[in-house]
Image (cartoon, rainbow, N blue to C red):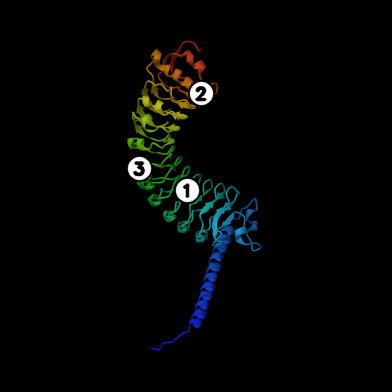
Amino acid sequence: MKLVSMSFGEFQSCHLLLGIALALCFNQVSSTTNETDKLALLTFKAGIPVDPFRVLNSWNNSIGFCQWHGITCGRKHRRVTILDLQSQGLSGSISPHIGNLSFLREMLLQNNSFNQEIPPQLGQLRRLRILRLDNNSLVGEIPRNMSGCSDLVTLMLGFNELTREIPGELGSMPKLQVFVLGWNDLTGSVPSSMGNLSSLEVLFLTGNNLGGSIPQVLSYLANLRMLAFGGNRLSGTIPSSLLNLSSLITFDVGENRIQGTLPAGIGLKLPNLEFYGIGLNHLEGPVPVSISNCTKLGSLQLNVNRFSGRVPSLENLYKLSVFRFSSNQLGSGRPEDLSFLCSLTNSTKLEIVSGGGNKFGGLLPKCVGNLSTSLTFFSLNENRVSGEIP
């Protein structure tokens, strides 16, 4: 082997040439990757035949793609980080090439008329934090490899025409905080893997065709503020373990097929509740006395169930605006049945009191004249109330 000696000056020159070569190589790669973003955007544009506000007219070679309408690029790499075309009346498909925008952090395409399926290539966007495709006309199933977007914080696919089951793989996104799939045509059950979404704050699945029962593992979601499962085909009981979710603000399982009774300590365990919707189910038993401890409650909806017995005092529900308890078996035909109405005089924001179709008896108490001046609806039809209206 022949050894070649090199002077210090020659070494410096060689080092400089190597640096120049590396820089040229880097610039070539950078140019190539930037071109990838541009081509991906142009392919995306080609799939949108309807652009009523002509927002995509700027997507041409006259200016750099970082200056195109709805595009934001990072300062360092000049790669697309935000695609924001929300509420522009756009109609068409979402190109699979959008998965080549490898630096994308936010995709905001909500409130348009995008149709066809969600391309599975979106699962390649490892840096994606916000994906909003809600309020479009998307069809087909939710891609299972969406779990590849491991940085997702917000995933909103509601108000579309999506079908099939909720992929269990979506339970492996540790940073997810907002998960909205409401108002689609999803079937199957609520995956138990949802209990792994430790950062989740909003779980909105209202208005689908989901069956099965409410998974008990949801009680592990210590940060959950909204649990909305209304308008599905859920059965079984409400897991008592959900009382551990002290941060809950909204609990809505109305219009399902849920059975059983309400936990006696509901008002002691869920102090932050503002909306409690369990109407249109098959629940029975008494209305818990502790419900009056939910002092932040604004809407209490118990209607169309099989609740029986007395309605407890609601004197601590100062913020209550909607109280629906119609079509149950409440009351016993006795004079004291309607005494709870006097406790509602503390609710200065009360707008709706709906209690028809029960077994209330006795006189209408005079205190109803002291109910909130904002009251717009008061109903006790189909009961056994007698006497005069105060």
Residues at discs 1 and 2 in contact (Cβ within 8 Å) = no
* Camera-nearest residue between 75 and 55: 75
**Disc 2 marks which residue?**
348
**Disc 1 marks which residue?**
154
Q: Residues within 10 Å of mark 1 (few under 14, many from 20)?
A: many
Mark closest to the chain's N terminus, 3 or 2: 3
Return the x and y of residue 128 as percentages of the image width and height: 48, 54
Measure the C-alpha gap from mark 3 to mark 2: 36 Å
Q: Residue at point 38% right, 43% down?
A: 221
**Disc 3 marks which residue?**
220
Q: Nearer the viewer, mark 1 or mark 2?
A: 2
Return the x and y of residue 146 as percentages of the image width and height: 44, 54
Measure the C-alpha gap from mark 1 to mark 2: 36 Å
At label 2, the amino acid type is Thr
| Residue 371 located left or right of residue 242 | right
Return the x and y of residue 21 as percentages of the image width and height: 52, 76
Mark closest to the chain's N terminus, 1 or 2: 1
Measure the C-alpha gap from mark 3 to mark 1: 19 Å
Which residue is situated farthest in the front direction here?
A: 8
Q: Residues within 10 Å of mark 2 (few under 14, many from 20)?
A: some
* Camera-nearest residue between 66 and 22: 22
Mark 1 lies on a secondary structure that is strand
Q: Residue at point 63% right, 53% down?
A: 55
* Camera-nearest residue between 133 and 198: 198
